[in-house]
Image: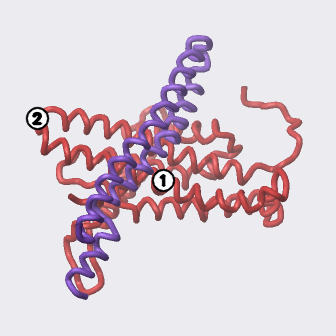
Amino acid sequence: MDNMTIIAVASIVTAGITTSFGAIGPALGEGRAVSTALSSLAQQPDASATITRTLFVGLAMIESTAIYCFVVSMILLFANPFWNHAIALATGK
Amino acid sequence: MRLSPDEIIFWQYGLFKLNATIAWTWGLMFVLAVGSALVTHNLSTGLRRSRWQNFLEIIVTAIEKQIEEVGLRHPEKYLGFLGTLFLFVAAASLCTVIPGYEPPTGSLSTTTALALCVFVAVPLFGIEEQGVGGYLKSYAQPTVIMLPFNIISEFSRTVALAVRLFGNMMSGAMIIGILLTITPLIFPIAMTALGLLTGMVQAYIFSILAAVYIAAATRIRKPKLEPDARH
């Protein structure tokens, strides 16, 4: 395999692994957060406004870790700096 | 496949490029500014009001209430900054129902600019509230050991603000693009509707986080003696 192929294989495989593993943790965390919020909503319906607001903020914070992984995998796939470097090398610049 | 609307270039002259991000940002700013100016140029204080005035009053009152709930004592002082952030991000994601529109918040440049505004505004509000010394002292809270971590968190939360908004907006556009090639009939519409919800939540998160940072920077550390007079 030449350099280009190695970089392509590594980028694609790593992008898939990044997104899949990055989705596991936030999914578990969001599940816990939602289940806790639901049980506290059932116990205290009066505080629903505060609970819902805090829940949304917390969910977005948790979800952003998955989003970071997604951004990294998108960079690997569509804006890979090593890829451009290898192309520049291959075209003899 | 495009990663951001930066890559759509309408017009180029030498080094100056007019890409879709800049064009849509200015378009949104124009609509928001001219719309607000048109609505507010004859306000009435009586019982008869135009429906647009009611609309703006609802928005402004709701934002003010949210800021107050975060813990900022005088919401009207921060309303201009936080409200503008919220309205811009919300309008940017709500306008995705217009065909051919690309949300400018789907570009890392826009979100970085917004996050840098927060990065600059938080110390300014903090210094205004508790003076330079008082603000700088808040970095050494609770102990001096926390000083480097507080400084690091100042930068990392700015990066997190920018990347979170960019990632959410970009992933929404990307998912719709991918779905259009796989199942072009119904599913893109459902994902667009979900994208509207995500956009509103992200706008809310962005402004609430900015409000929380400002609240943390402006909190004067003294024992709270006065009871809450509002309730």
Tell which subunit mark 1 falls on: B
Q: Which quarter shows the N terminus of chain A?
A: bottom left
Give above or below for B135 relative to B194. Answer: below
Locate residue B95, reporting x and y percent: 29, 47
Locate residue B98, reporting x and y percent: 21, 47
Pick the front one: B199 or A77: A77
Estimate how packed mark 2 is, as few (under 14), some (14 to 19) or many (20 or more) residues with alpha carbons within 10 Å. Answer: few
Pick the front one: A10 or A46: A10
Locate residue A13, reporting x and y percent: 31, 52
Q: On the rendered structure, is B31 left or right of A34?
A: left
Q: On the rendered structure, is B172 left or right of A54?
A: left
Give above or below for B216 relative to B193. Answer: below
The residue wearing badge 1 is B84
SS category of the residue bearing label 1: helix
The amino acid type found where label 2 is placed reads Leu
Alpha-carbon distance for marks 2 and 1? 36 Å
Locate residue B179, reporting x and y percent: 18, 41
Give above or below for B231 relative to B37. Answer: above
Q: On the rendered structure, is B19 left or right of B33?
A: left
Asked if residue B31 shows in the view, the reply is no
Mark 2 vs 1, N-terminal side = 1
**Residue under disc 2 on the same chain as residue under disc 1:** yes
Chain B colour?
Answer: red
Asked if residue B83 shows in the view, the reply is yes
Estimate how packed mark 1 is, as few (under 14), some (14 to 19) or many (20 or more) residues with alpha carbons within 10 Å. Answer: some
